[in-house]
Amino acid sequence: MSAESHSRHYIKIWAILVVLLVISVIGPMFGHKWLTLITAFGIACVKAYLVAKHFMHLDIEKAMIRWVLITSVVLMGLFYAGTAPDVMEHTGLHWTNDAAIYASENPVHEPGDHHAAGAGEGEAGHAAGEHGGDAHGGGDAHGAPAGAEVASTAEAGSEQGGETEEAAAPAPDGEVAEAAPATAGAAPGFDAAAAFQSSCSTCHGEAGDGNGPVGAALNPKPANFTDPAFWEARDDAMVHKAIKEGGAAVGKSPMMAPWGSTYDDAQIDAIVAYLHHFNTAGGATTEAAGETP
Amino acid sequence: MKPIATTRSASSIPTGRLAIWWVLASEVVIFGGLLGSYIMHRLGHPEWGETAAHTNTWIGAFNTLVLLTSSLMAVLAHDAAEQGDGKKAARFIGMTMLGGITFACVKSFEWYTEISHGFTITLNGFWSFYYTAAGLHALHVIAGTIIMGFIAFDANRGRELQRVELIGIYWHFVDIVWIFLFPLLYIAK
């Protein structure tokens, strides 16, 4: 081959590679899973082959080199075959991978999800604590001796927390009163109880038992927040997601509408914390569930 | 006189080229282990698909094009070196370097955007693989680009022309790694 035809050959290979690239980008647009996999990985293999053969000249390289490379690839395959079963499965004969199970049940898709996922414990105070500056503010309010020296934004935060503490505690019941400030800390000035009564109680019932006037007619029935089993099966991140993105987003009834455009993340956290009061399990909330309006 | 390492060859493969293949054989295991782990985790975590949807396919595809083109430049440099045309080889290596630099710039822009939107290495398993795999690859791109600077300098003076082929082989390998990273991180969503 002359020098001229050499470079023409290389350019031809390059052109084929570019066409293959275009196909692998277009492939997923049809939305067929198998087509995507083939255009993505099938084509990747073809491209790798073309580069190895025509650019790296592996085809005319000494056989020894090919054996060295094949050995590497085989070792890699052995590693994969030996490890993958334990990683891909989350339970086995005598073991479970709790972290992986938790991760797949509580997926973090977006940076914001972390907030919700962090508010896991099911305590009102916890949800409140998740929100950066406010968490500090709250801490200072109780911790700092006089608060006077802390003349900063943190101070302002705690002041505000303090104010809402009085303002947002309309509940007749000691328990709820204790919770209200905590939720208000997450979303200052926001009254989760009132929001629940106005937005949710028609379906979920004023007592959170799923027997609201509208809810009674629904199938499936709205979630019953007084049922301990409900809370055992979910964590706050999932409840948050259900409220924010609607029932359909968590595989539930689409009758449960998304509220993300009505309430922001902090407010939804506050609502989630409030919902815990309906739970009839767990010491503190037992009486609260009965007495909440 | 040249050092023995560049002249002696028991395998009838030039020593330098034998060495670069050994390097690549170990790279196969390094990248293979990393990508293999990613694949097995990805199969065990279907929920990653949704978070992977935030990677930008167009940026990934553009960078693939950049690397494919720079590979073409590398093989053309090799061609020129074989004909003993050091100056031409140096020019083509320069263009390959340009590809490497473009790739790195696009990558930093991409990461900057992602990180500033909160998609950091600690967000979840997908993003930690994303940054680790693409980061290790980017280090190879940067290292290759730097080494090419030295080789082009020599080649331009007609020296050590055999190295043009060696860096080319390495560069094509880096290209191949990206050929697999692209569908793994950008297309399978």
Image (cartoon, coloured by chain):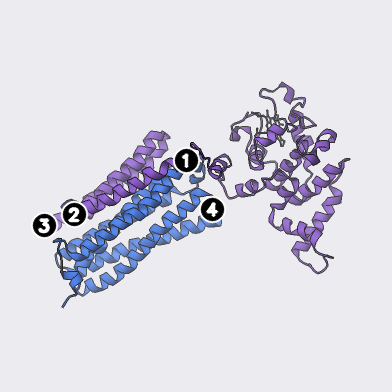
Chain colours: A purple, B blue
| Label pair 2/4, CB-CB below 8 angstroms | no
Q: Which residue is mark 2?
A: A64
Q: Which residue is mark 1?
A: B44
Q: CA distance from mark 3 to mark 1?
A: 52 Å
* Subunit of label 3: A
The secondary element bearing badge 4 is classed as loop
Q: Quadrant of residue B3?
A: bottom left
Residues at marks 4 and 3, CA–CA distance in whole angstroms: 51 Å
Checking the image for residue A2, the label placed there is 3
Q: Amino acid at mark 2?
A: Met
| A109 relative to A145, above or below | above
Name the residue furthest bottom.
Answer: B1
Circle 3 SS class: loop
Q: Is residue A96 left or right of residue B28?
A: right
What whole-number distance in Å separates the C-alpha atoms at marks 2 and 3? 28 Å
Q: Say whether marks 3 and 1 touch (CB < 8 Å).
A: no
Q: Amino acid at mark 4?
A: Phe
Q: Is residue A24 above or below residue A251?
A: below
Q: On residue A52, which mark appears?
A: none
Q: Residue furthest right?
A: A172
Q: Are marks 1 and 4 on the same chain?
A: yes
- For the point 43% across and 43% down, the residue is B40
Q: Nearer the viewer, residue B102 or B40?
A: B40
Q: Residues within 10 Å of mark 2 (few under 14, many from 20)?
A: few
Tell me the crowding category of disc 3: few under 14, some 14 to 19, or many 20 or more residues within 10 angstroms, Cα based: few
- Distance between the Cα atoms at labels 2 and 4? 44 Å
x 47%, y 40%: residue:
B44
